[in-house]
Amino acid sequence: MGEPDTVPITDLGLDPPIVEAIIGRTLTGFSLITVSGDRAWEESVKNRIALSKACVKLDFDAVPAVSDYTLCSRRYKPRILPGGRFIDEWGRILEPRLESKTTWYVGGVVTTEEKMEEYLPPDPEEEGRFELVERVLKSLKGKDVALMCQGHSGWHMAFQVRGGIDKLLIDMYRRPEAVHKFMDKIAEACRGLVKLMIEAGVEVLFMTDDYADCHSTFMSPSQFREFELPNMRKMIELADRM
């Protein structure tokens, strides 16, 4: 006999066409990450359940059941822009790609320092978020899988809402105090969403983000320690407490 399988097999997510091929059903909406349309909450629930079902069929050891990307409230309605683009609940501008049923990030609504100060992230306590997680986890009841959630510490949502990594990095040099306030309130909302997902029954938290490409890191070590590391530590401390 060979050695036992001790390496957990999972993934951060599956694109909609792959999910459709695995479960044999057509999905509605544009993406498993963020959805557009008049029934955003309902479609988000259905698509996350479909993703979970596909992961179980693939015999994954852990399922990325829910994410702060898709944890929309019941009242969420995307703001449709000319050309089919839309603004999601965070304030990210997204473009649906019909051929792949995914959404491409193209910009953010925070374009000035004044808007950084005025910006309000989604309220983790808003109606529907906890129920969304409960419904998805209920679909996995009795399955021999670990229940995972995806969370972000603040940097990711901040640079997307700001309009790109380059803009937020320049802000760190030109207006560091404004960036601290901006990232901190986004990070607080992210922690609230992770807390909610853990309270609903998620067993594993994985934190993902864009910190580097194949050439170098996006920010310097000193910038990372100043702007990102404190919020990352708070997220880890939250998970440890729960």
Image: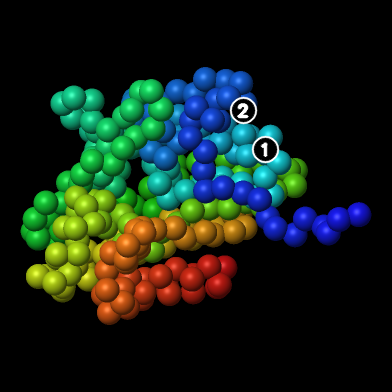
Which quadrant of the view contains residue 3? bottom right
For label 1, the crowd category at 10 Å Cα-Cα, with few meaning under 14, some 14 to 19 and many 20 or more, is few
Q: Position of residue 175 (x, y in %)?
A: 11, 70
Q: Which mark is residue 22?
A: 2
| Residue in the picture at 54% in, 59% down | 205
Q: Are marks 1 and 2 in contact (CB under 8 Å)?
A: yes
Q: Which of the marked residues, 1 or 2, is nearer the chain's N terminus?
A: 2
In this figure, which residue is indicated by the disc labeled 1?
58
- State how far apart marks 1 and 2 are (Cα): 8 Å
**Front residue of 172 and 239:** 172
| Residue in the picture at 57% in, 20% down | 25
Q: Amino acid at mark 1?
A: Leu
Q: Position of residue 235 (x, y in %)?
A: 44, 68
Q: Which mark is residue 201?
A: none
| Residue in the picture at 14% in, 64% down | 170
**Front residue of 74 and 221:** 221
Q: Position of residue 146 (x, y in %)?
A: 67, 52
Which quadrant of the view contains residue 165? bottom left
Q: Quadrant of the C terminus?
A: bottom right
SS state under label 1:
loop
